Amino acid sequence: MKKYLFVLKVAALFMGLTLGWVTAGLAAIPARYDVSIIYSGLNQAVIPDSLKADGKTRSAAIYIAEFVDARPVADKKLVGHVREIGDARVPVFLKNDIPSRIIANSVKDYLKKAGYNVADKLIQWDLKEGALPKKGPKVVIGGSLDELEVSCWTGVFSNDYKAVMKISLVVADAVKGTILHKSQVSVAVTKTDVTYSEALLGHQGDTALGDAIDKLFEGKTVAQKIKAALAQ
């Protein structure tokens, strides 16, 4: 009987502590979270041999266009949600830049690492052949952000993080005014951690972005299209 009462007391104590944690968590739910997403994988990126610039392809100019944000959201800095204990959904916003510009700058840095002559300043392009610049570059590279969700499902004892990203890439011959290549990649990364922080949430976005950039250029087709247009 004493053993039974002891077990009941321990269970009651555990339930009380858990209820206290949940109540404290509900009371502390913020209106929003703010994170940064950066292309942190550039130094570790392995450029495929087929993509590395050589000969004429090193000097011909490439312009990168700010990507089109095709997501159906009014605020383009909205990148996800945190599902709190009690089922509250708190929006997550970017604080360092808009995602379409972050992706474009990441593509620019990746191609610079591959040895190409990439202009520093991003241009605006709506991905239509008729809107390509008439002077300057031989190749214009742009694309669209089709999906982005950086999320976390918080729990009493662990937190489940996830980042999903879908990006389309468009490569155009600016001299001929034609689109040469279109492709789309999707990535998803997950992580479970005992702690919650905006830094960990943003890091999932960093990882997804790095994986997406690698996938955009991993095939030989896009490299061949870029090199052929630059060499003419």
Image: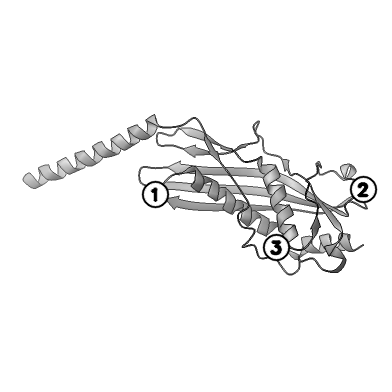
Q: Which structural element holds mark 3?
A: loop
Q: Position of residue 91 (x, y in %)?
A: 54, 34
Q: Position of residue 147 (x, y in %)?
A: 64, 44
Q: Residues within 10 Å of mark 3 (few under 14, many from 20)?
A: some
Identify residue type, mark 3: Glu
Q: Which structural element holds mark 1?
A: loop
92 left or right, relative to 193: right
Is residue 216 or residue 77 the one in the foreground? 77
Toward the front, the furthest residue is 120
Residue bearing mark 1: 194
Q: CA distance from mark 2 to mark 3?
A: 29 Å
Identify residue type, mark 1: Val
Quadrant showing the N terminus: top left
Identify residue type, mark 2: Lys
126 left or right, relative to 191: right
33 left or right, relative to 223: left
Q: Which structural element holds mark 2?
A: loop
Vertical relation: 157 (above or below) 27: below
Which numbered disc flags the more N-terminal residue, 2 or 3?
2
Residue bearing mark 2: 135
Q: Total of numbered circles in the picture?
A: 3
Q: Position of residue 83 (x, y in %)?
A: 47, 38
Q: Residue at x 50, y 34 (%)?
A: 90
Q: In front of the other: label 1 or label 3? A: 1
Which numbered disc flags the more N-terminal residue, 1 or 3?
1
Label drawn at residue 218? 3
